[in-house]
Amino acid sequence: MTGATGTLLQVHLEDAGARSWWAALANVLAGSNGSAQYRFVARPPSLTQDATSAPVVGATFPVVRAQDLADRSSPNAWIEIAEERLDELDRRLLADGWVRTDETGRHWWSRTYVRRSEQGSKQGSTTT
């Protein structure tokens, strides 16, 4: 999304096989007990906003398909690695010039970022 607030990205959770049939097939062959490989993806908050932006894709982690992904309590074995993967994506976005905002989406992983360079240029621009 572009406009008064700059370009926004929000972290979404997706099945790694959603974008690649190879990944989906590999998960079926290598997975066990109904598990799937998920990953966090940073992209504009909705698909209608700036659909030309390439998503920033994080590393995968295993999740049991029937598991409630919003449940962060024990004994969810996936939660620790999911939090690690989210923090890895966060560090990558910050290193690439994104700044995390105070805004959050519906889920605990729905972090929102704005481009640092756009934020600074809007604050420091003057007309001569």
Image (cartoon, rainbow, N blue to C red):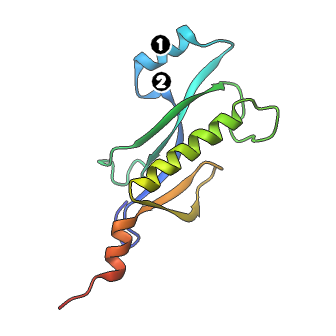
Can residue 16 be seen at all in this image of the molecule? yes
User: The C terminus appears in which quarter of the rendering?
Assistant: bottom left
Check disc 2 and report its element: helix, strand or loop.
helix
Query: Does residue 7 lie above or below 41 as drawn?
Result: below
* Residue in the picture at 47% in, 24% down: 17
Check disc 1 and report its element: helix, strand or loop.
helix
Q: Which amino acid does label 1 sit on?
A: Leu
Which of the numbered marks, if any, corresponds to residue 17?
2
Query: Residue 25 location in percent, x, y?
Result: 47, 13
User: The N terminus appears in which quarter of the rendering?
Assistant: bottom left
- Pointer 1 and pointer 2: residues touching (CB < 8 Å)? yes
* Residue in the picture at 34% in, 64% down: 2
Dot 2: few (<14), some (14–19), or many (≥20) neighbours within 10 Å? Answer: some
* Residue in the picture at 54% in, 12% down: 28
Dot 1: few (<14), some (14–19), or many (≥20) neighbours within 10 Å? Answer: few
Describe residue 2's horizontal placement relative to residue 40 as left or right: left
The residue pinned by badge 1 equals: 25
Describe residue 22's horizontal placement relative to residue 85 as left or right: left
* Residue in the picture at 53% in, 16% down: 27
Q: Which residue lies furthest to the top in this view?
A: 29
Can residue 45 be seen at all in this image of the molecule? no
